[in-house]
Amino acid sequence: MAIFGKMGMYFHTLVTASMIATGAIVAPPSTAATFKVTVENVAPESGINLAHFWIGFHDGSFDAFNAGEAASDAIALMAEEQVIGLGARILADFNIPTPQLTDIVISTFAAGTDYAFISPELQSALEAGSDRATISAILDSIFNSDIDVKDLPPSPGTIAAEFANSQAGKNGGTQDILFYPTLSPIPIVQPPGTTASRLIEVDDPQKNRFFSYATMLFPSNDAFIGNDDPQGIQVFDEQGNFLGADFLVLGNQAWDAGTEVNDEKIFSMPANIDENGTVQPHPGLKAPGKGGIVDSQLDGLSFANADFSAPGYQIARITITKVDEPNTNQGLLVLGGLLSIVTIMSKLKQRKNNFSSRFN
């Protein structure tokens, strides 16, 4: 993905929000338990970054991907663009003011986002090149909508939607998003040496004993980490007793989604060449001096140590601990849910017309 597409996506993931009301499955206090999931980027300085981190507690039936098989559209979207379908949480935490949202909307429209899905008036104004004041006024009208995102259906085409519609989701599974709350130097990307965490309530731990995760590695074409075995990480025993988790994700555990050729032209045009492959262990990045990611910089940020295939390379440490306090961070912004329809549906339309049936 080229710099305008790939990095534009980071800004527009601020408006790529979820239709899944995080924490919408609220169990009675006697059966629900609250836990803290923490992700630490333990890569070296100038190393690989972590994108939005999808997490799920479930009954062991949710299998997001399989090595040797073609990645789903949802995994492709996550591995290439870091979109997982729970971005409303980002909007809720950042509370982005209208002027900044106006800039984001104008930029993402230039990148190809179709805003007619939520507002023909907004789409027409953008197409006509209307001034910022006009666009801001339309966005203000969207902000004032009374629509509750909890009443909207899941965003199609994302891993969050797949989980919500799966047997695991319907059986009381719970999912959420972790992200590092910064807009600089790279928006919403977790750099080495930082930690992100989230409190999450699990309904009926005895039934939802297993943990799954997935995130894109940035910068890369379609590298990601995630557990191939849906029952490989057990957080509760068969009686629902807490076991917890504390494990490292190593560089040799990274996956290649097989959906985009690893040309490493992340910051230039052209990029985004369809691979039409299968999920495989990632071969790593190009060696120094080959013009790849490790030779690149973004706003002065170096990725010289980003090759996670180096011996002993550590990417992330994931811990799950039990806490006594309830999870009260469930607020979602209306605009986030509305703009999710725009971004995802626009991607679906683009993907439908693509020979490989992959999102751009």
Image: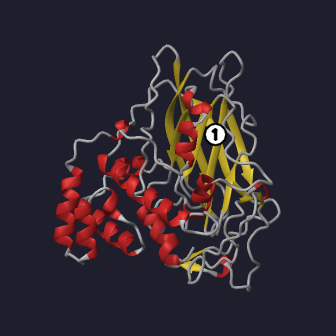
Asked if residue 193 can be seen in this view, the reply is no
Q: Position of residue 262 (x, y in %)?
A: 70, 73
Viewer-closest of 196 and 27: 27
Please tell me in which quadrant of the rendered image residue 168 appears.
Answer: top right
Q: Position of residue 193 (x, y in %)?
A: 59, 58
Above or below, 230 against 336 in this view is above
Residue at figure coordinates x 50%, y 33% from the top left: 200
Residue at figure coordinates x 30%, y 46% from the top left: 334
Quadrant of the image for the N terminus?
bottom right
Viewer-closest of 269 and 53: 269
Q: Residue furthest right?
A: 311
Please tell me in which quadrant of the rendered image residue 140 appears.
Answer: bottom left
In screen coordinates, is 297 left or right of 26? right
Q: Position of residue 318 (x, y in %)?
A: 65, 44
For label 1, count other residues whose C-alpha is less than 10 Å away and answer few (under 14), some (14-19) or many (20+): some
Q: Which residue is mark 1?
A: 319
